[in-house]
Image: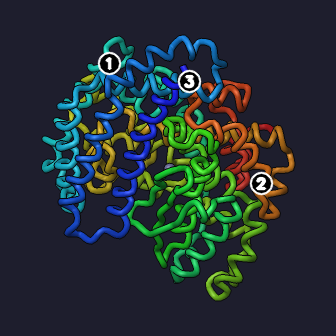
Amino acid sequence: MKEKFAELKRRLQEVYDLRGAIHLLYWDQATYMPPKGAAARGRQLATLEHLSHNKLTDPAIGRLLDELAPYEQELPYDSDEASLLRVTRRDYERAIKVPVEFVSKVSAHRAASFDVWTRARPANDFQAVKPYLEKTLEYSREFANYFPGYEHIADPLIDLSDYGMTAKTIQALFAELRQELLPLVRAILEQPPVDDSFLHRFYPEEKQKAFGEKVITQFGYDFQRGRQDKTHHPFMIKFSLNDVRITTRFDEHNLGDGLFSTLHEAGHALYEQGIAQELEGTPLASGTSSGVHESQSRLWENLVGRSRPFWDHYYPELQAVFPDELQDVSVEQFHRAINKVQRSLIRVDADEVTYNLHVMMRFDFELALLEGRMTVDELPEAWRERMRTDLGVEPPDDKDGVLQDVHWYSGFIGGAFQGYTLGNIMSAQFFQAAQRAHPEIPEQIGQGQFDVLRGWLTEQIYRHGRKFTASELIQRATGQPLGIQPYMNYLRQKYGQLYQLDRVTAPS
Ligand code: ZN
């Protein structure tokens, strides 16, 4: 059995290393590649993707999994070995159900669709992408149908990023959240707007970068096992557990943009850097779901990085970096400005409170499109209508409406968005459990110390990689299934104070 297990691990390590190489090429494409490198890069990626798919779906892997099944039965569920077999079986069975011709067809369509979208968005031309989007919807349904037995057609698509969650459970959770969130958003928006004009003074890039890197080093991001570079749309990417990179962007007239993007991506990276080294080179060496991943980026960005204790410590340092720009701004004013709630058209620019309304709209539309309750044609108008009712603001054009996110133009329709809001909900539940175990955490944050918080997160979440599903992890770490109350309590308390909303502040 030992030899068979070693043989399986050797084969899986080849897949892992190929994935690392693919990620390296993507990273380069989004950071330093000269424009004319694009055509060859597309080919290189397709070749490696094909190789990696073939290696994962090699019938030898299926045989080894069968032969190792009795061995798995003898091992504890949470052992490295049993977890490796369980997760590999899931990956393998998913990969062999989808014909390789379909995979190639979809990846060619994605590239074409993305290309059209990059021109259609600035031109505000929904008609140009419409046929591509219709094809994408068709392929999304086709993909789901390789997994018969699902309850909802979106379930196989949701499984790709948030394994174990279903349309039904997410719908129920989101309905509850929406019901509690809408009155809070309305109450906040009735208040006088917060002045954040000072965030748009001139903040030189180099100083912003140095400050952000200092903060994430103190969070525990290890620059010996990572680096930060510039890009248009920031992301975190991993080549191995010891090379976890982040990207950011700077706007010299928007202090929050670069800083919070850096904190966000560092949160993703802390998760990957925190995975146990014993899992390196295996399918377990990765975050477990997009929801749990996003819970970590949002936790470090928002629950830590936009909190008052954090700024009580860091604001004097920030003022020392930008003495002229911030001399007339108090920490109260600064804290209010970086937490300003407003009606916005663009999801990625939205504040913590309204952000979820943007996400839930997209999730609902994905289900409606997949079920056939809505056509691609009806999408732009449905978008305007929903923005009007939820946020009281209507996009003047499709560029800042239905064309704004890359997801549907470079991937499937379905499973693309729920992770963002699941992550917000989870972030508060994890943070509450961490504070229950270590009540000194806020005080520590107020001293610029994060080791107790990071230690708890590493122990409960990071080190396990993909050993546990999101639901298992939440239950183990917090003693509860996923629920919205910790998140709503957090929002009510924080924004109740910031906007003096006595009416909607929950009794503490
Ligand atoms: Zn993220």
Q: Amino acid at mark 1?
A: Phe
In the rendered image, the vertical position of residue 166 relative to residue 250, given as above or below: above
Q: Amino acid at mark 3?
A: Lys
Quadrant showing the N terminus:
top right
Residue 32 position by quadrant: bottom left
Residue located at (52% from left, 57% from top): 243
Q: Residue 13's x, y, as percent?
A: 45, 39
Q: Residue 421's x, y, as percent?
A: 52, 40
Disc marking residue 147 = 1
Q: Mark 1 vs mark 2: which is more N-terminal?
A: 1
Q: Number of labelled discs?
A: 3
Image position of 58 (left or right of 444): left
Disc 1 + disc 3, Cβ < 8 Å? no
Q: Residue 399's x, y, as percent?
A: 27, 56
Residue 33 position by quadrant: bottom left
Disc 1 + disc 2, Cβ < 8 Å? no
**3D distance between C-alphas at marks 1 and 3:** 33 Å
Q: Secondary structure at mark 3?
A: helix
